[in-house]
Amino acid sequence: MKFIRYQYGDEEPRYGWVLNDVVGPVEGSIFHAYRRMEANIPLEKVRILSPVMPSKIIGIHHNYADHAELFGEEVPDIPRCFFKPPSALIGTGDVILLPPQSRQVEHEVNLAVVIGKRGRWITTNEAMSYVFGYTAANDVTARDLMRRDRGPERGKGFDTFCPVGPWIETDLDPVDTMITCRVNNELRQMTSTREMIFNIPQLVSYISSFTTLYPGDLILTGSPAGVDVLRPGDKVEITIEGVGVLINWVEQEIR
C-alpha cells in the first residue's frame, strides 16, 4: 500500500493513501491505528509533502563496494553511520538549494527504510517487523565541505539536502530492488540493493544498538558509485523500483 503525506488546498497537511492516482485521507496514525477513507481526490490536485516527519535520519557511508572504491576507502567491516537533521527534509517537486559555501554539491540515490515502531537492541531476526515501509531518498552532499571539515555534519546537513518521497510503499521486497538516479534524463547511478554490503536487518539491528528508533525514523541505506555534481537548473530523478520517482529541481541559494 502507498501512504502519502499531502496538503489539499488550504487544509492542514495530513496522511492519506494512494490508489490508481487517486488519494484518500487516513484517520488516525498510520503507525498505530488508522482508518482509510474513500479515495476521491485526484493526485495532481494535492501537494505531495515529505512522507514522514522523523525524529532522526540515519545515513550509511559506503554501503556499496563500488562507492567505497570510488573514494579510495576500504570496504567497511561494520556500518559507518551519520545523521542528517530533519530540517534537511523536502518532498518531491521541491527545490534543492545549492549553498554559497560549497562548489561541489552532489546527488546520492538511496533506498530509505521507514521505521514503524519503537525499538532498541533489535536483533537481526526481528528487525523486519520494525520496518513499516520504504521510500526514495537523495542524500545530497556538499563533498568539498565534508573534506574540509573532516566530517559529514555540515556537508550533509544543509536545508533541502534530504529530498524524500514521493510516498511510503509498504508492499516491497527490498532484497533485489533497482535504484537509479538521472539528472536531466542522463543516467548517473544504477544498481540493485542486492549489492549492499550490509542488508536492512543488519542495519536496523546495528543502529538500534546505540539509539532508540521511533515510528517515522528514516534509515538511508547507502548509495552506489556514480555520484556527480549538481548545478542550477538541473532536474534530479531518483527512482526506486516498486516505489516511485522522487523529482526535484536545483537552484542556487541567494543570501
Image (tube, rainbow, N blue to C red):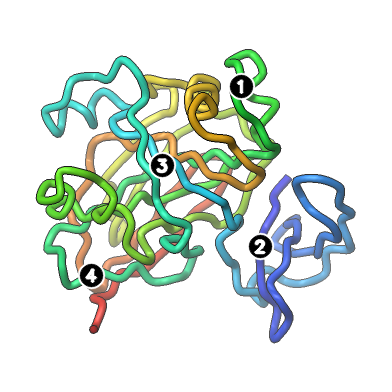
Could you say where residue 141 lies in the image, as x and y percent from the top left? 26, 52
Query: With respect to residue 196, does 44 lie above or below?
Result: below
Question: What residue type is disc 1 on?
Answer: Ile
Whichever of callouts 4 and 1 sits on the residue coming sooner in the sequence is 4
Identify the residue position indicated by label 4 in the image: 99
Q: CA distance from mark 4 to mark 1?
A: 38 Å
Residue nearest the viewer, comparing 93 with 219: 219
Tell me the distance, in whole angstroms, between the alpha carbons under discs 1 and 2: 28 Å
Distance of mark 2 from mark 3, alpha carbons?
20 Å
Q: Which residue is mark 1?
A: 122
Q: CA distance from mark 4 to mark 3?
A: 22 Å
Disc 2 + disc 4, Cβ < 8 Å: no
- Of mark 1 and mark 3, the one earlier in the sequence is 3
For this view, does 50 lie left or right of residue 85? Answer: right
Q: Which residue is mark 2?
A: 5
Please tell me which residue lies in front, 70 or 201. Answer: 201
Q: Is residue 32 left or right of residue 202?
A: right
Q: Quadrant of the N terminus?
A: top right
| Residue 176 visible at all | no
Q: Give the CA separation, mark 2 to mark 4.
A: 27 Å
Query: Of label 1 and label 2, which has the lower sequence position?
Result: 2
The amino acid type found where label 4 is placed reads: Pro
Q: Which residue is mark 3?
A: 110
Q: Is residue 189 visible?
A: yes
Provide the secondary structure element on which disc 1 rests: loop
State if disc 3 and disc 4 touch (CB < 8 Å): no
Q: Residues within 10 Å of mark 2 (few under 14, many from 20)?
A: many
- Taking 101 as reference, is 15 left or right? right
